[in-house]
Amino acid sequence: MNDTVPKQEVVAARGIKVAFGAVKALDGADLVIRAGECVGLVGHNGAGKSTIVNVINGGLTPQEGSVSYDGTPGLHGVAMARAHGVRCVFQELSLCPNLTVNENVRVMHADLKGASWRRRGLELVRRQLEETFPGHGIDCDSTVEDLSIAERQMVEIAISFTTVSQRPRLVILDEPTSSLDAGLAAQLMAYVRRFVKEGGSVLLISHILGEILSTSDRIVVMKDGKVVADKPATEFDTRRLVETMGSVVKEHGWKRTMGTKSGAPVLSRPALPGSTIQLEAFGGEIIGLAGLGGHGQTEALLDLYLSSSSNWWPTREPKMAFVAGDRGLNGTFGLWSILKNLSISSLKALSSRNMIDADCEDEVSERWKKRIEIRTPNMQNPILSLSGGNQQKVLFARALATTSKVVLMDDPMRGVDVGTKQEVYEILRAEAAAGRTFIWYSTEMDEIRLCDRVYVFRDGAIAAELVGEAITEPNVLAASFAGGEAA
Amino acid sequence: MKLSSGTVRMIIPAVSLAVLLSAVFYMQPRAMSYTGLNLLFNLAVPIALATIAQMLIMAVNDLDLSMGTFVSFAACVTATFLQSSPFVGLLILIGAIAVYAAMGVIIYLRELPSIVVTLGMSFVWAGLAVLLLPSPGGSAPDWARALMTSKPPVVPMAIVASVVIAAVTHFLVMRSSFGVLIRGVGGNSRSVERAGWSVIGIRAATYALAGLFAVLAGIALVGLTTAADANIALRYTLLSIAGVILGGGEFVGGRVSPVGAVIGALTLTLAGSFLSFMRISPDWQIGAQGAILIVVLGLRLFLNRLEKREKNR
């Protein structure tokens, strides 16, 4: 930090704007990474971290803004980024599980050529593993699927740092320690420091703030697709980072029912290893599942759902209804009409002698069309003629039209416009007052604040339970990001 | 010592072939001779080639339902054009391989299910084959006939051919860089793409290679039978899929084994002979062949489960 000459830029992304449909993922973000520094990147869900990583590694072309490698603006793309020594370790493991370790080196490094590539690849990855994780004990001859998750992550990291014919200049590590234990994580962070000292650069994304604070030279905080802070790491501590990530608290004209927990819980799930808090829900409550995306919330919902439903026999009165988050993947029936999409979950109740009563079906669908304001002239239109927000409303109506007392929601408001959201919130509130229980996984802070009680997930287990007025953005953020001691 | 999942996958096909072979030898000791072995296995050579072709398609997570009609078509071309005017015949076969490559590209670009595209193409191949040979006929090119009926010393032709096919494809698919990329596309095509490779190119090449092996299967078949017919190899579609699975391959995930596929094809051929030796009436043979398949695959599932339990402990 004491040199006055600005170091050479490895990658510079300036004024980047990326929108997916109506959702602005990046709204004029700047990120410059120079040689010989480790930049920490933090932000809550949807802040745009993954999007800017994809822009830098060439996988995504921004609609506006410029990306330049080595200070020279030029073509953009995966090949270009790789040619300038940009390597990326993705959050989800991206090795080929059916190949051996050295075959994966061959896939990742096109420049590993020649007759003896197997032997050389093996040597390279062995040496790199030894350097990064001394005493790792990984059998490099085995297929990747025979390795444990932690070993796969270690191999992937080692492959990215390996020099075949060209030294990596910038390595992007997206949650590199998510499957590593504390000892291995510390080894990796020590290696990152050595790598940076030798002139390489690292972009580090992690939910463990201790790692970010101790390893980075500079920390970039993102929020809502913008960079809100870009300062030397020494100017931050855990508390200040959490504060910077949060937004100004907006007032909400919302009164929680604060229903006293009465009687037996409607459902409960025993505490998982790594947590002492068990998930419980009482009648009429709206329970929020918060935390960073992919930390076990969806699994918890599925677990709850599967534990209450039989795999073999359909039940006349299902105990739970499920609102899917990924509409295309597991929500809508693309070829069906709106009407059929809505009534599919309550067919049992709508039929007599195993034949569907068409009048009854029409009546129910018209009622929900009015109540939830599905904007269509005719419920017989195909579901895909609706906008995304209205499709989501149909999925809500599908769940609410059933008689089930519990509704599970898997981040259903992803990519839905604000107006629709407000309408759905109203209906949720009314239904909860009528005694229904909602379990709501959401990645959006505004929605989490609407809940009566919130469980914050971290690393697959519940890290904290917040009730009523304690549900504030700083509290949720603090629980989602592990402090330094939990590295 | 801990066995790798690849080794476990190879044990079952090898053991089942050995068991079937010893059962056949026990019932018919005269099969244990040069001619006996050749007779038992010579029809396995074209099936092995078709199985390899199917295995390549399955390595990139697709399935080829046109294998049988394509091999029939290749056989008809071999028995007509390749015999009478070799140059034209060669051009037709090269064109057919190019169509395979194009199929690989279209399936990837348009995100079509391979089953639908290849099922559609199977009618095209069948139609072309009927146009070439409306009734059984034609004759094998002399070189194909000579190759398939040659008598190498000590070991019969069928065995030599199987070993050569297994060795060549093992080198191609399991050892070469190109093979690594094929299996990489099957295992995780996104990461192959992110590493800067052209997935389209890899898939086109894989399909072309599969087309080449299917053409070789047609030529080998005509070399054995001396004449062709538009329906000569219809069974090959399902036989080749069964052979790949029997040999330890899987439908998705790029988990394939060329040596296993050849062994699988040999096992399937042998299962037919075994049932004849058992004097099971031909009416029941297909059912009995299915039963053998179920037993072998059941064994494999059982082993997989054991392996998983071992891993979780």
Image (cartoon, coloured by chain):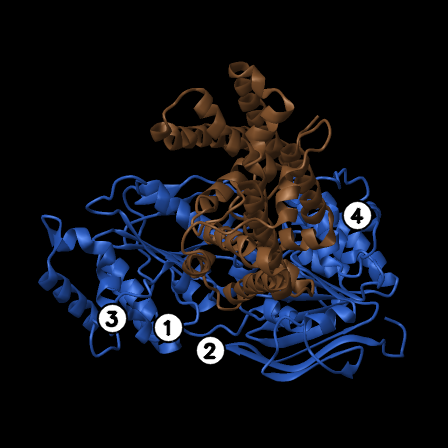
Chain colours: A blue, B brown
| Helix, strand or loop at mark 1 | helix
Mark 2 residue crowding within 10 angstroms, few (<14) / some (14–19) / many (20+): few
Task: Tell us which disc is closer to us: 2 or 3.
Answer: 2
**Residues at marks 1 and 2, common chain?**
yes
Q: Which chain contains the residue that carries disc 3? A: A
Q: Amino acid at mark 3?
A: Ile
Residue kind at label 4, given as amino acid type: Arg
Circle 1: residue type? Gly
User: Quarter holding the N terminus of chain A?
Assistant: bottom right
Q: Which mark is residue A388?
A: 1
Circles 1 and 3: CB atoms closer than 8 Å? no
A174 sits to left or right of B23: right
Label 4 residue SS:
helix
Q: Residue at x 10, y 58 (%)?
A: A357
Q: Mark 1 or mark 4: which comes first in sequence?
A: 4
Which labelled disc corresponds to residue A372? Answer: 3
The chain that hosts pointer 2 is A
Question: Is residue B112 visible in this depiction of the protein?
Answer: yes
Question: Residue B173, image x and y in percent?
Answer: 67, 48
Mark 4 chain: A
* Upstream in sequence: badge 1 or badge 2: 2
Q: Which amino acid, mark 2?
A: Gly
Nearest the eye: A215 or A138 = A138
Relative depth, front residue between B5 and B288? B288
User: Mark 2 = which residue?
Assistant: A21
First-in-chain label (1 vs 3): 3
* Residue A89 x, y percent position in the rendering: 68, 59
Of helix, strand and loop, which one carries label 3?
helix
Pointer 3: residues within 10 angstroms few (<14), some, or many (20+)? some
Instruction: Judge by depth and name the residue closer to the eye, A340 or B77.
Output: B77
User: Could you tell me which residue is drawn at 37 percent across and 58 percent down?
Assistant: A409
CA separation in Å, label 1 and label 2: 10 Å
